Image (tube, coloured by chain):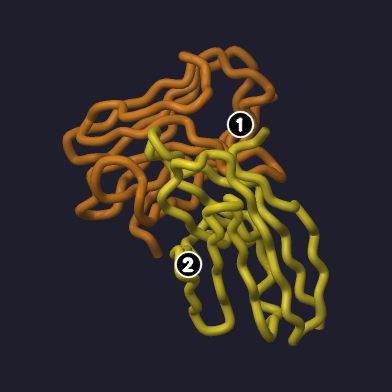
Chain colours: A orange, B yellow
Amino acid sequence: ETGVTQSPTHLIKTRGQQVTLRCSSQSGHNTVSWYQQALGQGPQFIFQYYREEENGRGNFPPRFSGLQFPNYSSELNVNALELDDSALYLCASSLGYGQSGELFFGEGSRLTVL
Amino acid sequence: RKEVEQDPGPFNVPEGATVAFNCTYSNSASQSFFWYRQDCRKEPKLLMSVYSSGNEDGRFTAQLNRASQYISLLIRDSKLSDSATYLCVVNGGATNKLIFGTGTLLAVQP
């Protein structure tokens, strides 16, 4: 096991609602990245947090936002949910600035938007 | 053009076969390259890093061709347990973020 835990594991929401997903990083890791994986696709980079600050963002609208806490755990918030937001949301922890090394993924939160 | 492109497959091969996956990337400034494995409905896990000189880990061999911006993964003597999706992953150069390909699905048949 990677030591990265995510919650909830599954959830169902309706269009227009808001959702918060949570991630606890592996012990000693100070960087958390969030990815969205739609069915049949590879993970798409949403954003990364390093030492509580956003450090890079992918091509996602502002209704996708996040936080990192002093213990390096993180949240992903999505407002005004759309049907296309249905996906597996993966959190990955790593050590150090940027992503030049291995990412350790949690098992993901599977979001269904109806 | 996608930043990282892979043939999605599926590749259906018999046990014991040798299979090769290819991947191309668009950012010539990329510095780090990886193959990740993702089992059905599970999280991706690092299979191996890819080095310029090529590297081998048991039945798995990875190659990098910087001039052609091309990465490959060779699996020898395929096992049923190799059945998974193989994700090509490239560091995004100046953005320093890991970019994943769509993945190639491998199904090893008995």
Q: Nearer the viewer, residue A105 or B64?
A: B64
Q: Where residue B83 sits in the image (x, y, percent)?
A: 69, 70
Rendered position, A18 above or below B101: above
Q: Nearer the viewer, residue A15 or B87?
A: B87
Query: Residue at 76% of width from left, 82% of height from top?
Result: B17
Q: Quadrant of residue B110?
A: bottom right
Q: Amino acid at mark 1?
A: Ile
| Mark 1 secondary-structure assignment | strand
Q: Amino acid at mark 2?
A: Met
Q: Nearer the viewer, residue B74 or B103?
A: B74
Q: Where residue B108 sits in the image (x, y, percent)?
A: 76, 75
Q: Chain of mark 1?
A: A
Q: Where residue B77 sits in the image (x, y, percent)?
A: 68, 86
Rendered position, B27 above or below B11: above
Neighbor class of circle 1 (other Cα within 10 Å; few <14, some 14-19, many 20+) is: few
Q: Residue furthest front?
A: B67
Q: Is residue A46 left or right of residue B2?
A: left
Q: Where residue B101 sits in the image (x, y, percent)?
A: 61, 47
| Mark 2 secondary-structure assignment | strand
Query: Residue at 65% of width from left, 76% of height from top?
Result: B75
Q: Which residue is mark 1?
A: A12
Q: CA distance from mark 1 to mark 2?
A: 35 Å
Q: Is residue B11 left or right of residue A59?
A: right
Q: Chain of mark 2?
A: B
Q: Quadrant of residue B20?
A: bottom right
Q: Which residue is mark 2?
A: B48
Q: Residue A57: give its label.
A: none
Q: Residue furthest left?
A: A70
Rendered position, A23 above or below B84: above
Q: Nearer the viewer, residue B59 or B108?
A: B59
Q: Is residue B80 left or right of residue A78?
A: right
